[in-house]
Image (spheres, rainbow, N blue to C red):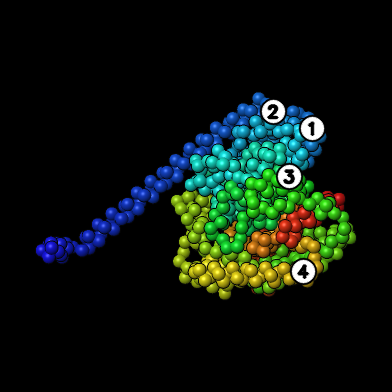
Amino acid sequence: MTELVDNVWNFLTEVDKWKVIGSASITFLTIVLIRRMVRKRSVMSRIKKKQEQLQEARSRLRDRVRTCPPLSHFKELDALQVQQRLQANEMTPLEALRLYQKRMVDALESNCICEIIEEAEAVAMSVSADVQSPIRGMPVSVKENIQVAGYDSPIGLVSGVLDPAKEDSVLMKVLRKVGAVPFVTTTMSPTGMSLDASTEIYGKQRNPLDVKRLAGGSSSGEATLLAKGGSPLGFGTDIGGSIRIPATFCGICGLRPTSYRVSTIGLRSVAKVGSANVRPTVGPMAKCTSLLADAMKAILCSAMFELDSRVPELPFNDRIYSGTEPLVIGYYTCIGEELAVRPVVAVEAAMHKVISLLRSKGHKLVKFSVPDPDKLIRISTTALIADGGASLLKATRDDPTNPRFRQTLRFFSLPVFIRRLIAWFNYRFISKLIGTTTRSSIGCQSAQDVLNLLGEVSDYQVEFSKAWSEAKIDVLISPATPFPAPLDTTPDMLLPGVSNFLLPYNVLDYPAGVLPVAKVSAADVKASKNAEERYRRDGDWLNAEVSSLQEGTQGLPIGLQVVGKPLCEEIVLRVMHEVELGVSEA
């Protein structure tokens, strides 16, 4: 044995160690390069095969639309008119499906459509006229992470294609039970954590109202299809504003219910393992608030309660939704102190308009002070990305994500000390909000950090509840976002405040809905230019930049958010409906 060791030692001492190191390095790099090439080829092969499947499905759909076009006297009907005819049995579910299949074909170029559900026609023909449901016979679209048996649910990632779900989500089962006709799944941003839903699978996606702008994320496919009239009713998911941001940017309505008010069984989400005390929720989206209410009325039924024991047995309370008694409504127009992104002129003007409208209807409006708003913004961001982006990096390994999300992933891949240094620099020299957001996105670095965060969230939930009770308010209103849809060239660095009004209610777990209440006017754009000059004089770089981005926004929708107490979706929808009617009358 000693002789063997001596021989090995003599061999190693005689060999040039630098040659050995060089050879080993070249071998290692060659192996790494080959593995990357193999993985890239595998990814491209998956994309090609999936796109071939999609093209075949689209060709079949176009053939069906050509051979069985919608009846001419139905072609101009909007979603509410279709619903009314279905309820009156003046239109069959199959006729409604044919109408929206044609509209879906017209929307294909928007790249908002994933899977065409082939069984939709059979389901439409099987719907009984005896089913008592406000959405009986209605074609319904669902976001791609809501599983449909036999179809992919890739959450915007190439790694998720060619792996069809084996079972329907609870939502899909309930929709069919109440007579709805799910007919298509829609795109989402990769992992649900980006404002851009463009992917290598489905293509580039932009705002249906202005193709130079973002549609928002992550339920952007739903928002786009609904805004284009390609679906009368859809369902998205919300983890940090994922229903409410695209709904606001695209000018439609959306509801983020309380956790577990709607079942999430069969929902794919990276946030399940990457977030702390923030749960994904499923909610309806539509062009009008009454369809949101009807969707909730329909699905909050015995079938939902039986299929998911976590869902409280609380059928939709129509008495509260249809109530007429005056309410006490809290409001605020800006959230944050040092970390505030001021709403642009158009958003503030829309808020004042809504406040006046609600007062004219007999409601009492009181200014609400969000307790320690900077702390709320900080813990909300940390809770959303509690693992510092580790789950996102794992989910997107070797995935060709869009350039915007790729920049986010590059930041998450940096060593923690470098990310802390960037956060310090941003806070000290650029913007306190950008610096705080950067620091919060580092997440928790130890189990104790997680426990401390959960404790902070729990304590703040109590603090917020006390503030709500002391204000004696029934609901709370605020802007949905501080600005309308940004240009797709706008860097994420200038958009840290996009979810400041929205994300806190995911962490607090209060139901929240959004609806369009105004459009940007020429006067608003001009006033934003004046605001930009004022912010620059005051040394407020971030708000000056946000104001400068308002050039060219004339005509874009402005959204309002309505928030209620947990499990009080009905009163949220009531106020949304009142505002919608008031705005349309005005």
- Viewer-nearest of labels 1 and 3? 3
Q: Which residue is mark 2?
A: 69
Q: Which residue is mark 1?
A: 89
Quarter of image, res 457: bottom right
Dot 4 amino acid type: Ser
Q: Position of residue 410 (x, y in %)?
A: 49, 59
Q: Residue at left 64%, top 51%? A: 309
Q: Give the mark nearest the N terminus, 4 or 3.
A: 3
Q: Which residue is mark 3?
A: 298
- Viewer-nearest of labels 2 and 4? 4
Q: Secondary structure at mark 1?
A: loop
Q: Are marks 3 and 2 in contact (CB under 8 Å)?
A: no
Q: Secondary structure at mark 4?
A: helix
Q: Secondary structure at mark 2?
A: loop
Q: Which residue is mark 4?
A: 469
- Above or below, 59 against 428 in this view is above
Dot 1 amino acid type: Asn
One can see residue 574 in this view: yes
Q: CA distance from mark 4 to mark 1?
A: 46 Å
Q: Give the mark nearest the N terminus, 4 or 1.
A: 1
Quarter of image, res 415: bottom left
Q: CA distance from mark 2 to mark 4?
A: 55 Å
Q: Residue at left 64%, top 41%? A: 173
> How dense is the environment of label 2, judged by Cα within 10 Å: few (below 14), some, or many (20 and up)?
some
Out of 302 and 220, give the one closest to the viewer. 302
- Viewer-nearest of labels 3 and 2? 3
Q: Give the mark nearest the N terminus, 1 or 3.
A: 1
